[in-house]
Image (cartoon, rainbow, N blue to C red):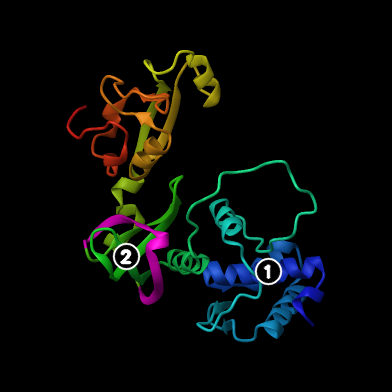
Protein backbone atom coordinates (compact mmCIF):
# COMPACT_ATOMS: atom_id res chain seq x y z
CA UNK A 1 0.00 0.00 0.00
CA UNK A 2 1.32 3.42 -1.00
CA UNK A 3 1.52 6.11 1.70
CA UNK A 4 -0.88 8.26 -0.28
CA UNK A 5 -3.47 5.47 -0.05
CA UNK A 6 -3.51 5.59 3.75
CA UNK A 7 -6.34 7.39 5.49
CA UNK A 8 -5.72 10.64 7.36
CA UNK A 9 -5.52 9.02 10.81
CA UNK A 10 -2.99 6.46 9.62
CA UNK A 11 -0.88 9.19 8.05
CA UNK A 12 -0.92 11.10 11.32
CA UNK A 13 0.27 8.12 13.32
CA UNK A 14 2.96 7.07 10.87
CA UNK A 15 4.13 10.66 10.54
CA UNK A 16 4.39 10.83 14.34
CA UNK A 17 6.65 7.74 14.33
CA UNK A 18 8.70 9.28 11.52
CA UNK A 19 8.98 12.61 13.36
CA UNK A 20 9.96 11.02 16.68
CA UNK A 21 12.67 8.91 15.09
CA UNK A 22 14.10 11.80 13.11
CA UNK A 23 14.21 14.39 15.89
CA UNK A 24 14.69 12.29 19.04
CA UNK A 25 16.25 9.11 17.67
CA UNK A 26 13.72 6.84 19.41
CA UNK A 27 10.04 5.93 19.57
CA UNK A 28 8.08 3.55 21.80
CA UNK A 29 4.70 1.82 21.62
CA UNK A 30 3.72 3.56 24.84
CA UNK A 31 4.33 7.00 23.27
CA UNK A 32 2.05 6.10 20.36
CA UNK A 33 -0.60 4.77 22.77
CA UNK A 34 -0.52 7.98 24.84
CA UNK A 35 -0.37 10.36 21.89
CA UNK A 36 -3.32 8.84 20.01
CA UNK A 37 -5.21 7.14 22.87
CA UNK A 38 -4.85 3.71 21.29
CA UNK A 39 -4.46 0.21 22.64
CA UNK A 40 -1.10 -1.55 22.52
CA UNK A 41 -2.29 -3.85 19.72
CA UNK A 42 -3.24 -0.86 17.55
CA UNK A 43 0.13 0.81 18.23
CA UNK A 44 1.88 -2.41 17.24
CA UNK A 45 -0.05 -2.46 13.95
CA UNK A 46 1.05 1.11 13.23
CA UNK A 47 4.68 0.22 13.88
CA UNK A 48 4.37 -2.82 11.61
CA UNK A 49 2.78 -0.65 8.90
CA UNK A 50 5.58 1.91 9.24
CA UNK A 51 8.22 -0.84 8.92
CA UNK A 52 6.41 -2.19 5.88
CA UNK A 53 6.99 1.14 4.11
CA UNK A 54 10.51 1.85 5.42
CA UNK A 55 12.03 -1.39 6.77
CA UNK A 56 15.52 0.10 7.24
CA UNK A 57 14.55 3.07 9.42
CA UNK A 58 14.66 1.56 12.92
CA UNK A 59 15.78 -1.32 15.12
CA UNK A 60 14.15 -2.59 18.30
CA UNK A 61 16.17 -2.33 21.52
CA UNK A 62 15.04 -5.28 23.68
CA UNK A 63 16.78 -3.96 26.79
CA UNK A 64 15.20 -0.49 26.79
CA UNK A 65 11.97 -1.51 25.03
CA UNK A 66 12.16 1.15 22.35
CA UNK A 67 12.81 1.53 18.65
CA UNK A 68 16.07 3.24 17.70
CA UNK A 69 16.82 5.15 14.53
CA UNK A 70 19.20 3.44 12.10
CA UNK A 71 21.98 5.15 10.18
CA UNK A 72 20.12 4.20 6.99
CA UNK A 73 17.06 6.25 8.06
CA UNK A 74 15.20 8.04 5.28
CA UNK A 75 12.04 9.96 6.20
CA UNK A 76 8.79 8.44 5.08
CA UNK A 77 7.23 11.91 5.03
CA UNK A 78 8.50 15.29 3.90
CA UNK A 79 9.05 17.56 6.90
CA UNK A 80 8.75 21.15 5.70
CA UNK A 81 11.65 23.13 7.25
CA UNK A 82 9.66 26.25 8.18
CA UNK A 83 6.72 24.34 9.65
CA UNK A 84 8.98 21.86 11.43
CA UNK A 85 11.06 24.57 13.11
CA UNK A 86 7.84 26.13 14.42
CA UNK A 87 6.70 22.73 15.70
CA UNK A 88 9.99 22.08 17.45
CA UNK A 89 9.97 25.54 19.03
CA UNK A 90 6.47 24.90 20.39
CA UNK A 91 6.90 21.24 21.39
CA UNK A 92 4.53 20.01 18.69
CA UNK A 93 5.31 16.50 17.49
CA UNK A 94 2.44 15.58 15.17
CA UNK A 95 4.80 15.21 12.23
CA UNK A 96 2.15 15.43 9.51
CA UNK A 97 2.00 18.61 7.43
CA UNK A 98 -1.54 18.46 6.11
CA UNK A 99 -2.67 20.66 3.23
CA UNK A 100 -4.89 23.43 4.57
CA UNK A 101 -8.29 23.71 2.94
CA UNK A 102 -8.66 27.30 4.17
CA UNK A 103 -6.25 30.06 3.15
CA UNK A 104 -6.09 32.60 5.97
CA UNK A 105 -5.39 36.26 5.08
CA UNK A 106 -2.18 36.39 7.14
CA UNK A 107 1.36 36.91 5.88
CA UNK A 108 4.69 36.81 7.70
CA UNK A 109 8.05 38.22 6.63
CA UNK A 110 10.19 35.92 4.52
CA UNK A 111 13.09 34.34 6.36
CA UNK A 112 16.37 34.80 4.52
CA UNK A 113 17.93 31.63 5.88
CA UNK A 114 16.35 28.28 6.72
CA UNK A 115 18.56 25.64 8.36
CA UNK A 116 18.89 22.17 6.87
CA UNK A 117 16.23 20.19 8.74
CA UNK A 118 18.46 17.10 8.86
CA UNK A 119 21.20 19.11 10.60
CA UNK A 120 18.56 20.24 13.10
CA UNK A 121 17.40 16.64 13.53
CA UNK A 122 20.90 15.33 14.33
CA UNK A 123 21.48 18.09 16.86
CA UNK A 124 18.08 17.49 18.42
CA UNK A 125 18.86 13.77 18.78
CA UNK A 126 22.20 14.59 20.40
CA UNK A 127 20.65 17.02 22.87
CA UNK A 128 17.84 14.68 23.91
CA UNK A 129 20.23 11.75 24.33
CA UNK A 130 23.00 13.87 25.95
CA UNK A 131 25.61 13.05 23.32
CA UNK A 132 28.49 15.02 21.85
CA UNK A 133 28.68 15.71 18.13
CA UNK A 134 31.40 16.19 15.57
CA UNK A 135 30.57 18.91 13.05
CA UNK A 136 32.02 20.70 10.07
CA UNK A 137 31.60 24.41 10.75
CA UNK A 138 32.41 27.45 8.65
CA UNK A 139 33.13 30.59 10.67
CA UNK A 140 33.73 34.14 9.49
CA UNK A 141 37.14 34.25 11.14
CA UNK A 142 38.70 30.85 10.43
CA UNK A 143 36.76 29.29 7.56
CA UNK A 144 35.75 25.60 7.51
CA UNK A 145 36.97 23.06 10.03
CA UNK A 146 35.99 20.20 12.30
CA UNK A 147 34.77 20.82 15.85
CA UNK A 148 33.45 18.73 18.70
CA UNK A 149 30.47 20.17 20.52
CA UNK A 150 28.14 19.16 23.32
CA UNK A 151 24.90 20.91 22.31
CA UNK A 152 22.17 21.71 24.84
CA UNK A 153 19.69 24.06 23.12
CA UNK A 154 18.57 25.12 19.64
CA UNK A 155 17.60 28.77 19.58
CA UNK A 156 15.76 31.17 17.30
CA UNK A 157 17.26 34.57 18.09
CA UNK A 158 14.75 36.37 15.88
CA UNK A 159 17.05 36.68 12.88
CA UNK A 160 18.58 33.22 12.54
CA UNK A 161 18.80 29.86 14.25
CA UNK A 162 21.80 28.74 16.27
CA UNK A 163 22.78 25.95 18.60
CA UNK A 164 24.09 26.68 22.08
CA UNK A 165 26.84 24.21 22.91
CA UNK A 166 30.01 23.51 24.85
CA UNK A 167 32.87 23.83 22.39
CA UNK A 168 35.65 21.36 23.20
CA UNK A 169 38.13 23.40 21.16
CA UNK A 170 37.77 26.63 23.13
CA UNK A 171 36.57 24.87 26.30
CA UNK A 172 33.67 27.28 26.59
CA UNK A 173 29.96 27.58 25.86
CA UNK A 174 29.29 29.33 22.57
CA UNK A 175 26.68 29.91 19.85
CA UNK A 176 27.00 28.23 16.45
CA UNK A 177 24.86 29.34 13.50
CA UNK A 178 22.95 26.35 12.13
CA UNK A 179 23.26 27.35 8.48
CA UNK A 180 27.07 27.28 8.81
CA UNK A 181 27.05 23.63 9.91
CA UNK A 182 27.48 21.32 6.91
CA UNK A 183 27.78 17.94 8.64
CA UNK A 184 26.84 16.45 12.01
CA UNK A 185 27.98 13.09 13.38
CA UNK A 186 26.66 11.95 16.76
CA UNK A 187 29.39 10.52 18.98
CA UNK A 188 28.58 7.58 21.20
CA UNK A 189 30.27 8.69 24.41
CA UNK A 190 28.26 10.72 26.90
CA UNK A 191 29.11 14.30 27.77
CA UNK A 192 31.27 15.26 30.76
CA UNK A 193 29.80 17.00 33.84
CA UNK A 194 31.52 20.33 33.07
CA UNK A 195 29.89 20.28 29.61
CA UNK A 196 26.35 20.16 31.01
CA UNK A 197 23.82 22.93 30.38
CA UNK A 198 23.74 23.72 34.10
CA UNK A 199 27.40 24.76 33.83
CA UNK A 200 26.56 27.31 31.15
CA UNK A 201 26.23 30.29 33.47
CA UNK A 202 25.36 32.71 30.68
CA UNK A 203 22.44 30.43 29.85
CA UNK A 204 21.18 29.87 33.40
CA UNK A 205 21.59 33.50 34.50
CA UNK A 206 18.34 35.44 34.05
CA UNK A 207 18.49 39.19 33.49
CA UNK A 208 15.62 41.57 34.29
CA UNK A 209 15.21 44.14 31.50
CA UNK A 210 13.16 47.33 31.86
CA UNK A 211 12.31 48.62 28.39
CA UNK A 212 10.52 51.96 27.95
CA UNK A 213 9.51 54.21 25.04
CA UNK A 214 12.53 56.16 23.80
CA UNK A 215 12.52 59.49 25.67
CA UNK A 216 13.91 61.49 22.72
CA UNK A 217 12.81 59.76 19.51
CA UNK A 218 9.14 59.08 20.30
CA UNK A 219 6.63 61.93 20.26
CA UNK A 220 3.64 59.90 21.46
CA UNK A 221 4.89 57.21 23.90
CA UNK A 222 1.38 55.83 24.40
CA UNK A 223 1.59 54.29 20.90
CA UNK A 224 4.74 52.37 21.89
CA UNK A 225 3.17 51.32 25.20
CA UNK A 226 0.26 49.83 23.23
CA UNK A 227 2.61 48.15 20.73
CA UNK A 228 4.41 46.22 23.45
CA UNK A 229 1.69 45.85 26.08
CA UNK A 230 3.60 47.97 28.58
CA UNK A 231 2.24 48.47 32.07
CA UNK A 232 2.78 51.91 33.60
CA UNK A 233 5.02 52.74 30.66
CA UNK A 234 7.44 49.82 31.19
CA UNK A 235 7.91 46.43 29.55
CA UNK A 236 9.59 44.14 32.09
CA UNK A 237 11.24 40.99 30.78
CA UNK A 238 13.42 38.25 32.20
CA UNK A 239 15.81 36.94 29.55
CA UNK A 240 18.82 34.67 29.56
CA UNK A 241 22.13 36.53 29.65
CA UNK A 242 23.19 34.56 26.58
CA UNK A 243 20.15 35.90 24.70
CA UNK A 244 20.03 39.52 25.89
CA UNK A 245 22.21 40.96 23.13
CA UNK A 246 20.13 39.29 20.42
CA UNK A 247 16.85 40.62 21.82
CA UNK A 248 18.16 44.16 22.20
CA UNK A 249 19.50 44.15 18.66
CA UNK A 250 16.35 42.68 17.14
CA UNK A 251 14.16 45.39 18.63
CA UNK A 252 16.70 48.24 18.23
CA UNK A 253 16.68 49.01 21.94
CA UNK A 254 18.90 52.01 22.70
CA UNK A 255 21.41 50.86 25.33
CA UNK A 256 23.37 54.11 25.67
CA UNK A 257 23.63 55.86 29.03
CA UNK A 258 21.71 58.96 27.99
CA UNK A 259 19.38 57.56 25.28
CA UNK A 260 21.57 59.28 22.69
CA UNK A 261 20.90 57.15 19.60
CA UNK A 262 18.89 59.02 16.98
CA UNK A 263 16.68 57.76 14.18
CA UNK A 264 13.17 56.45 13.77
CA UNK A 265 14.29 52.85 14.27
CA UNK A 266 15.17 53.53 17.91
CA UNK A 267 11.75 53.61 19.56
CA UNK A 268 12.77 51.74 22.71
CA UNK A 269 15.24 52.47 25.49
CA UNK A 270 16.75 50.18 28.11
CA UNK A 271 16.16 51.97 31.40
CA UNK A 272 18.21 49.65 33.64
CA UNK A 273 21.29 49.12 31.46
CA UNK A 274 23.38 48.23 34.54
CA UNK A 275 21.66 44.84 34.48
CA UNK A 276 23.72 43.94 31.40
CA UNK A 277 27.02 43.82 33.29
CA UNK A 278 28.77 40.54 32.63
CA UNK A 279 26.52 39.37 29.78
CA UNK A 280 28.03 38.17 26.52
CA UNK A 281 27.07 39.17 22.96
CA UNK A 282 26.63 42.80 24.01
CA UNK A 283 28.73 44.08 21.11
CA UNK A 284 25.53 43.78 19.06
CA UNK A 285 23.36 45.66 21.59
CA UNK A 286 22.71 49.14 20.09
CA UNK A 287 24.94 51.76 21.70
CA UNK A 288 26.21 49.56 24.52
CA UNK A 289 29.82 50.11 25.55
CA UNK A 290 31.57 47.76 27.97
CA UNK A 291 32.52 49.49 31.20
CA UNK A 292 30.01 52.33 30.81
CA UNK A 293 27.28 51.37 33.23
SS state under label 1: helix
Say which of marks 2 and 1 sits in front: 2
The residue where tag 1 is placed is 15
Q: Is residue 229 at least partly visible in the picture?
A: yes
Q: Residue at x 31, y 40 (%)?
A: 284
Q: Is residue 191 visible?
A: no
Residue 69 occupies which quadrant of the picture?
bottom right
Residue 66, given in percent of the width and then of the height, sits at: 58, 76
| Image height of 250 relative to 76, above or below | above
User: Residue 16: image x %, image y %?
Assistant: 66, 67
Mark 2 packing: few (<14 Cα in 10 Å), some, or many (20+)? some
Q: Which residue is mark 2?
A: 138
Q: Within 10 angstroms of label 1, few (less than 14), some, or many (20 or more) residues?
A: many
From this view, report whether residue 280 is shown above or below residue 134. Answer: above
Residue 277 drawn above or below residue 95 = above
- Range of residues picked out in magenta: 170-189
Amino acid sequence: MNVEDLNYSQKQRLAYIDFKLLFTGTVTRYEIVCRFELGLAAASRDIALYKEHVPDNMNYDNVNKKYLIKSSFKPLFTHDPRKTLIKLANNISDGYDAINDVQFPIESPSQLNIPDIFIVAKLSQAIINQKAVSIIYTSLSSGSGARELVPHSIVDNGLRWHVRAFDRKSQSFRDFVLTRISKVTIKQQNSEPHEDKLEDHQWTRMMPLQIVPHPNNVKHPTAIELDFGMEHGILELNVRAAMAGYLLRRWNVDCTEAASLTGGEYQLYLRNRQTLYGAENLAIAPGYKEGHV
